[in-house]
Structures are given as C-alpha cells and as structure tokens.
Image (tube, rainbow, N blue to C red):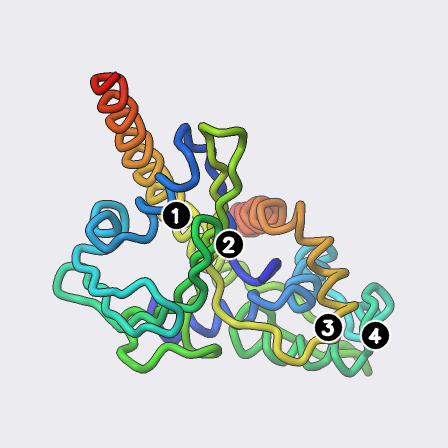
C-alpha cells in the first residue's frame, strides 16, 4: 500500500463516528443515508460528510436505486484496511514484547547486583 | 486520544522506573524500535529515527516520568511531524504493586479537532471495547464477502 493510500485509510477510519457509520454499512449490507442518520446520534449532514470521506477512501461505493442512493462496503479495500490495522497491531505487540524482555532483564540484573552487595 | 488508532497492552514484571528507561532512553529504543534513534527526551525536542536506509523526523510531545511519553512521527514523509500529517505514539505506564507495570501503547493518525466534548466522551466510552471488536468484525465480514 502506498503512503498516500495508507494515510487516506487512517484518516477515514481514525474518526470514531466515521467508524460507526462504516460499521453500520458493514453490518447491514446496502443502506441509505437517511436510514443511517436514524441509527446515529449525529446529524444527517454529518452522516453525509462521513459517507463522502469513506467513499473517497474507497471503503464504500454508492448506486442509485429509484430516488434513493444506496451505500455498500467495498470488500477489497476493507480487507486492505483490516490488514493495515492488524499489521500495525502486530508490530506493536512485537515491540511491547521486546520492551518486556529488556525491562525484565534489566530489573533482574539490578536485583542481582543489590543481593551481591548485601 | 481514545478511539483514534490502535491500542495494545502488556504487563511487565519490572517497576515503572525500569520500564520507563527501556521505553525512553535512545540506546534502549534502538533495541525495540528503530535502528537509529537521535532523540533528546524533552517535550518539543526534534529528533530522527532511522530504519535501515529509511527514516524520518520525530517530535517529542509529552514527557512525564515514569508514566507518560508520547512522540509524533511521519515516517517516511520527511516533513515536520505535526497534527494532521503524522502518527502520534503514546505510552501510558501504570505501576501494579512495586514490581510490575502495566503498559498501554496507542498509535493513531488524525485527531478530532472539531468535536464537542460530549460526543468525544460518548465515543471514547464506546471505544473501550471497540477497536478490537471492530477489527474482528471487519475481518470476518471481509472474509465473507471474499468467499461469497
């Protein structure tokens, strides 16, 4: 993934209310903006803005059905987003594991030194 | 910055002061983070972190020993890391008794600048179980969509 695409993804899903909107689209298949607005505690206008950002990030797409516009999730992009998040989480798990080993070794060494001095 | 990125946790069998040094001292950071760390651990200090032949600038934000440490980086962008173009990494250390420390790290990209506090709080509350569950759900939905 390019840095630019990565940045767009983070920006799109980094905002909790936007994530909530995405979550509702993911869980409910094809939905309209007005249906979404009924499910969230923020305005219809805010929902529309979130939909635009999610669409720009490629996470959702829209189609017209009669007078309604319906939104659905884009599986490939969602998969990419999921993997980007999982990779970052795994990276931090690895770093935290290294911090744990280093700190515990330093602590054990300090204790040993103290015991030798006593 | 609840709700804005990933959060991971670990319990370490060492006092917070020891864990603090491991996390913040540049010669220790090279053992768990970057290959090269040029950093003065002071709020506002500008530094550099190198990963192999890549790297980028880092700006220290919070230094509150032995419990809070945060910095911004936008590897491999090269521009000055500020809110909006960079990732914020935050460490929170909580002593558990005298000999153990709970460490939480978060990394996230884009701050909520225009949110009313009540809304931030509502979503911070929701987030408490949130990001992991959301990730699990995304993963299962995207697997379903792929197989279907």
CB under 8 Å between discs 2 and 3: no
User: What's the residue at 25%, 20% (across, down)?
Assistant: A112
Whole-angstrom CA distance, mark 1 to mark 4, is 39 Å
User: What's the residue at 45%, 64% (across, down)?
Assistant: B62
Secondary-structure class at tag 1 = helix
Whole-angstrom CA distance, mark 2 to mark 3, is 30 Å
Mark 4 nearby-residue class (10 Å; few <14, some 14–19, many ≥20): some
Camera-nearest residue between B11 and B55: B11
Q: Which comes before the other along the chain, label 4 or label 3?
A: 4
Q: Which comes before the other along the chain, label 3 or label 1?
A: 3
CB under 8 Å between discs 1 and 4: no
Mark 2 nearby-residue class (10 Å; few <14, some 14–19, many ≥20): many
Q: Which comes before the other along the chain, label 1 or label 4?
A: 4
Judging by the rendered image, the residue that carries numbered circle 3 is A70
Secondary-structure class at tag 2 = strand
Which label was assigned to residue B6? 2
- Whether labels 1 and 4 belong to a single chain: the reply is yes
Judging by the rendered image, the residue that carries numbered circle 1 is A92
Q: Tell me: residue B139, above or below residue A42.
A: above
Judging by the rendered image, the residue that carries numbered circle 4 is A34
Q: Nearer the viewer, mark 3 or mark 1?
A: 1
- Whether labels 2 and 4 belong to a single chain: the reply is no
Q: Nearer the viewer, mark 1 or mark 4?
A: 1
């Amino acid at each position: 993934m390019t840095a630019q695409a990565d940045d767009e993804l983070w920006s799109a899903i980094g905002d909790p209310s936007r994530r909530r909107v995405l979550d509702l689209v993911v869980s409910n298949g094809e939905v309209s903006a007005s249906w979404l607005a009924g499910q969230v505690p923020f305005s219809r206008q805010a929902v529309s803005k979130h939909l635009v950002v999610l669409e720009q990030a490629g996470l959702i797409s829209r189609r017209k059905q009669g007078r309604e516009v319906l939104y659905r999730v884009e599986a490939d992009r969602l998969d990419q987003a999921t993997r980007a998040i999982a990779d970052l989480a795994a990276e931090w798990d690895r770093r935290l594991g290294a911090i744990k080993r280093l700190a515990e070794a330093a602590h054990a060494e300090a204790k040993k030194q103290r015991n030798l001095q006593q | 910055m609840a709700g804005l990125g990933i959060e991971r946790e670990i319990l370490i069998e060492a006092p917070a002061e020891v864990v603090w040094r491991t996390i913040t001292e540049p010669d220790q950071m090279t053992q768990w983070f970057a290959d090269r760390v040029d950093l003065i651990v002071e709020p506002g200090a500008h530094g550099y972190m190198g990963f192999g032949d890549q790297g980028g600038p880092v700006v220290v934000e919070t230094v509150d020993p032995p419990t809070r440490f945060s910095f911004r980086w936008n590897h491999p962008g090269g521009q000055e890391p500020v809110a909006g173009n960079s990732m914020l990494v935050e460490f929170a250390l909580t002593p558990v008794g005298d000999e153990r420390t709970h460490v939480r790290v978060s990394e996230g990209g884009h701050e909520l600048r225009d949110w009313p506090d009540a809304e931030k709080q509502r979503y911070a509350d929701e987030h408490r179980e949130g990001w992991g569950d959301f990730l699990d759900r995304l993963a299962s939905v995207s697997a379903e969509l792929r197989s279907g």
